[in-house]
Amino acid sequence: MTFIERTRGRKHRVITAAVALAASALVLAGCTATGPGGGTPSGAANYNIVVMPKSLGNKYFAASDAGAKSAIEGFNGTYTEAGSNEASPTSQSPFIQTAIQNGAGAIILAANDPEAVCADLKDAMAAGVKVVTFDSDTNCRDAFINQATVDGVAQGLVDLAVKNFGTSNAVQIAIVSGGPNATNLNAWVDSIKAKLVAQAPNIQVVDVVYGNDVDADAYNAVKGVITAHPELDGIIAPDSVSVKEAAHYLQDTPALQDTIWLTGLGLPSELRDYIKAGVFDQFGLWDVGALGQLAAYTAKALIDGEITGAEGDTFTTPLGDYTVGKGGEIVLGPLFVFDKSNVDNFDF
Ligand code: RAM
């Protein structure tokens, strides 16, 4: 893995696996000497915050992390991005241990698996490090920032499918997801399948395949599922890499554009040209930058002791006031649907 260091000022570092352990001394270069957790010897709050996306190189997380960075630097914290190029269940473990060693005040993490890094995160919390998950949850953290409710995301995509296919004609669709263990994706897939059975049993899910958040894997997963199901009428891809590669494959195979309907969750910046070219019509998402910002403000509120992550806790942020819900979940807002009329209004 290559070592990437972007030295835009003292407070921004990117750490990859091969370098994580070696760089531990480096990371502290930009921080005051700190103990793990919220406090510093001077008693000042420890806003040394490490952000761990599912993987590096995914434009969705580049956008969320940019949001977190701007918020963290806005309250004079230190932002570090750490991660691997692979969105695999345990890929984040060494970074969590490095963050503990380096005296982080908080870890903000999007999980590739609900359980796989829990031992490391429990080490972090035992050391006083605040743990906030965002986008995709784990079973071990102080608070979770959910971009939209699982029900809201699934219902939004099901509504687009029903709008296209109706509730009478028998059709076959496939779901092209991302990482096979990802908490968020599996929750959406299960909810989409259950809602279709309940609301539109004519729309049959004939297969669920995985693109691993890797462009080539996603492209091949789309090609494979279309080849395996010659009667296929549509694809739902609730993953930004998979929906982009599904559009890419349909663009490469124009004859399929009239027979395969597509929707999913993706970035306007990556999908606008496909929408304008008529490869497909609509997709959903949320303000990814705001998701990263809210995760950062939540980490600050935990470090400051303003909240503990208990249900009912409330806190104020530049994005507005938020209340911690059941199980420590904080919801950013509803799913937003993009199409030709609005896709140019967004740059993420
Ligand atoms: C991918 C990841 C991420 C998900 C988006 C929609 O980037 O799977 O977790 O929220 O797609």
Image: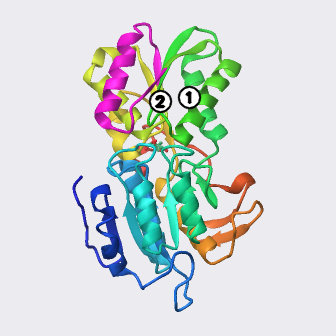
Q: Which amino acid type is shown beneath numbered disc 2?
A: Thr
Residue under pointer 2: 263
| Disc 2 to disc 1: CB gap under 8 Å | yes
Q: Which mark is residue 15?
A: none
Counting residues from the N terminus, which is met first, the one under dot 2 or under dot 1? 1
Please determine whether, in this image, residue 286 is positioned above or below residue 36. Answer: above
Please determine whether, in this image, residue 344 is positioned above or below residue 128. Answer: above
Residue sitting at the far bottom: 42
Find residue 157 and report its image quarter: top right
Find residue 195 and report its image quarter: top right
Of residue 153 and residue 261, the one placed in the foreground of this image is 153
Tell me the crowding category of disc 2: few under 14, some 14 to 19, or many 20 or more residues within 10 angstroms, Cα based.
many
Where does the image place residue 135, in percent across and percent down from the top left?
A: 53, 50
Establish whether ligand 1 lies closer than 8 Å to the Cβ of label 2. Answer: no
Q: Which amino acid type is shown beneath numbered disc 1?
A: Leu
Task: Look at the image and say whether residue 226 sits in the magenta stretch.
Answer: yes
Q: Which residues are magenta?
A: 208-235
Whether residue 191 is visible to the viewer of this picture, yes or no, is yes
Task: Residue at 52%, 92% (x, y): give it.
Answer: 42
Q: Which mark is residue 160?
A: 1
Distance of label 2 from label 1 (alpha carbons): 8 Å
Secondary structure category for the residue under label 1: helix
Of residue 190 and residue 251, the one placed in the foreground of this image is 190
Where does the image place residue 104, in percent across and percent down from the top left?
A: 48, 72
Residue sitting at the far left: 2
